[in-house]
Image (cartoon, grey):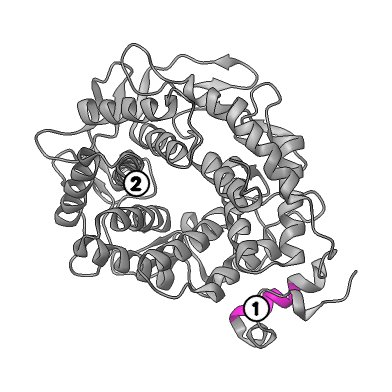
Amino acid sequence: MHPVNPVHLSLPLTALCSPAMKWSLAWLLIAGAARLAAAPLEEHAAAYRDQLTQRILPYWLATLDPIHGGFLLSADALSGPGNVTEKQLVSQARMVWTFAHAHRHGWDTPQHAALAAAWNGYRFLTNHFLDPAHGGYFWKTDRTGHVVDDRKLLYGEAFVLYAFAELHRATQASAPLVEARKLHQLIQQRARDAQHRGWSEHFTRDWRPLPDGDPQAVVEIAGLKSANTHLHLQEAFTELYDVSHDPEVKRSLIEALELNRQYFYPRDPAQSCFHRQPDWRPVTDPRSAGLSYGHNVEFAWLMIRADQVLGRPPDWPHFYAHVNHALAHGYDHPRGGLYHRGAGNAPASDQDKVWWVQAELLAALTDALQQTDNAAHREALDRLIHFLDRYQTDPRTGIWLDTVDAAGTPKRTGLAHAWKANYHDVRALIKFIQAFAPASR
């Protein structure tokens, strides 16, 4: 064990004395200060740069549906391509976001294939998912675009906002921004809880709330407010406000950010939770117990982004609280990788390593190191990448497997499906490459 060196702490030593930060000292005593020699993150960034252009983005471009539009997301590392019969709102919108994002950051082909893919997805969403009668976007269509599930789930609507804001930013085209602002207004009219603040999440086609506990809710639990949906609303409002400067969107962003900070991702990460009652009382159902390390670190860096867009000083102490808590209680220090779930300050209860969780830690540690170089964070990021490269990356395609166990044995070998698009991993890789190989493009 190496002695703790205060110079390399991300927070002042005085902060470690507060009740919410005592776990930081525990983690540092376990992990030490790590070796002070910098891990070869620049080499990893250069390798990922090549992977992104030569394998990862071409793989996702090949998912375009050449007949009906949209994207065909069904592939497994072991069994190969599957038969796509349905297209789901979240994954279709995420694909639009990623291709627009890749184009905006200079990762497109000379023929602008990523931009063409983004427009393809935009047309499929507006032609087939958009409800002409009641507004908002349906949950699911068949492969051809015929609606097979007409419910309005706010989790999905948030990703449409996110995708259309990014497509506008990438192209300066007005139509995506017009549609995004219309959708924001509709969400405020139909889903915002005017009495208790926040947003209700599950509706019929004509925006009537689904019954409490309705199994058709699909995402989270009908009748409750979820950390998951409110996080992605914050994410979407951040980018929509950044491109629109709409004061109404700004108010929505401030509200989402404040509620997430207070109720779902508080300064003491051990108090994080999955769900709240509509009036923000705690939920006692054991299905809502515990926390998600992936969502906690995702909130951390998205919070910093929201602060920056709002023109506020970034709340770095809150950010480091969540990152360091995840490293203390949810990180596999010997092998690398972030576990799925835990509770409070106890060891992780679910030690699976899910692809999107790894992506969000990659993004959060990238931001952490850009703010303050820290030997322990460098070591954690280096070990994470080594684990991903050795155990979670499909050698044939370069795409991350859905889920492996703590030792890296595959458990779910999906590469693309209704819940696995390219948004988490490509977003994190672009952030990482730009941070550590800024002269690469």
- Does residue 401 show up? no
- Residue 218, percent across and down? 37, 40
- Residue 141, percent across and down? 29, 24
Q: Quadrant of the C terminus?
A: top right
Residue at 29% x, 69% y is: 279
Which residue is under mark 1?
A: 11
SS at mark 2? Answer: helix
Residue at 52% x, 27% y is: 416
Say which label, 2 or 1, has the lower sequence index.
Answer: 1
Q: Which residues are magenta?
A: 20-26
- Disc 2 vs disc 1: Cβ atoms closer than 8 Å? no
- Does residue 2 show up? yes
Establish if 103 lies above or below 363.
Answer: above
Amino acid at pointer 1: Leu
Residue at 42% x, 53% y is: 228
Callout 2: 10 Å neighbours few (<14), some, many (20+)? many
* Residue 24 lies within the magenta run: yes
